[in-house]
Image (tube, grey):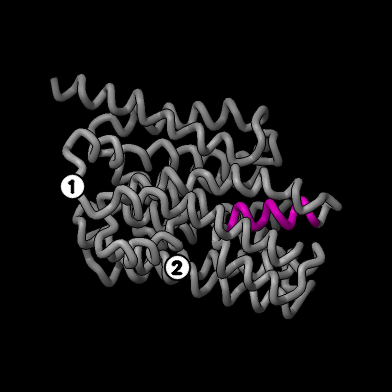
Amino acid sequence: MSWAALIGLAAAAYLLKAAGPVLAGGREMGPRVDQVLALLSVPLLAALVAVQTLDGGERIVIDARVPALAVAGVLVWRRAPFLVVVLAAAATAALLRAAA
Amino acid sequence: MSDRRSITRDALAIGAATGAYGVSFGVLAVGAGLDVARACAMSLLVFTGASQFAVIGVLGGGGSVAAAMGPALLLASRNAAYGLSLVPILRGSRLSRALQAQLVIDESTAMARAQEDPGDARHAFLSTGLSVFVLWNAGTLVGALAGEGLGDPRDFGLDAMFPAAFLALLAPQLRQPGARQAAVAGVLIAVALLPLAPAGVPVMLAALGVVPGVLAARRAAA
């Protein structure tokens, strides 16, 4: 990979990140816009959870990540601390894989 | 969630997990033919993990640099939506916002949006963004120098850690009006597209889930 290609990719990635905060940031947006922006992260994060759990390279794969997420879901529902949730999920997946 | 110390602690934990993936990235980047300088420069300058893994995946599989750009940019495109969602949270001068923008990624957005108080949200964004930035780059350097033989992060269940973390950070956001509808729509869009669309597209288009969310919130308020 040439340095020019690497810098080009970095510039494009940065412009995507910066467009909102640089162009629209630092001013009051009004309650209706704020409501949309506050909700915008919700479907993205929900989709990210689903994709990171099921993604097998452009196909759906059910593996140790699924029971790990189920354990995390129960712990989140029981209001367990963040660290407990993520460590329990990792331990579940690691133990299931070690046993397999 | 309002205690700043607990936010910082969670931010460091997320940084540690991404740091372990940074090691994995460094190993794979060198394996795909990048030198140590380019592997490290990519983590410093591109700094969005999914896109970086996509690039070295294509290069490692014998693909051209041009073929690697499309998937990388598709995966990076969700950062534009994250940047928009952070507009009410990121403050400061234009220069300060331009610097903070490099830290706009999955983890920093999720942590910031999980906080109710705006000051906590800024603290969560910066502490998570910086923690991930430092440890992802340190991990990349270690992996690029060490090469093979450091073990697969999946053996430690680290790949299951990320969806669990995002679920935990999503949960407090589900209390706002319309959020449940938005979340369900986002999951349905992403899962339906996962077997059909190129990587990056399912999560990006899941942003459209905001539409049923806003409609439900406005119906509830009317």
Amino acid type indicated by mark 1: Glu
Indicate which disc residue B13 carries. Answer: 2
Q: Is residue A98 left or right of residue A37?
A: right
Mark 2, chain letter? B
Decide whether residue B134 is among the magenta residues: no
Q: Which residues are magenta?
A: B49-59
Q: Secondary structure at mark 1?
A: loop
Amino acid type indicated by mark 2: Ala
Mark 1, chain letter? A
**Residue B155 visible, this orientation:** no
**Residue B204 visible, this orientation:** yes
Residue B179 point in image, percent of width and height: 31, 34
Residue A10 point in image, percent of width and height: 58, 60
The answer for how far apart the CA atoms under marks 1 and 2 are is 33 Å
Give the residue drawn at x 53%, y 65%. B17
Q: Can you say whether B83 is above or below B156 in the image?
A: above
Depth check, front residue: A90 or B96? B96
Neighbours of disc 2 within 10 Å: few (<14), some (14-19), many (20+)? many
Give the residue drawn at x 65%, y 31%. B197
Indicate which disc residue B141 carries. Answer: none
Q: Which residue is mark 1?
A: A28
Q: Nearer the viewer, mark 1 or mark 2?
A: 1
Depth check, front residue: A34 or B157? A34
Q: Can you say whether B182 is above or below B104 in the image?
A: above
Residue B177 point in image, percent of width and height: 23, 32
Which quadrant would the N terminus of chain A be assigned to in this image?
A: bottom right
Residue B96, by quadrant, is bottom left
| Magenta stretch: dominant secondary structure | helix
Depth check, front residue: B39 or B149? B39
Q: Can you say whether B149 is above or below A50 in the image?
A: below
Give the residue drawn at x 81%, y 66%. B33
Q: Secondary structure at mark 2?
A: helix
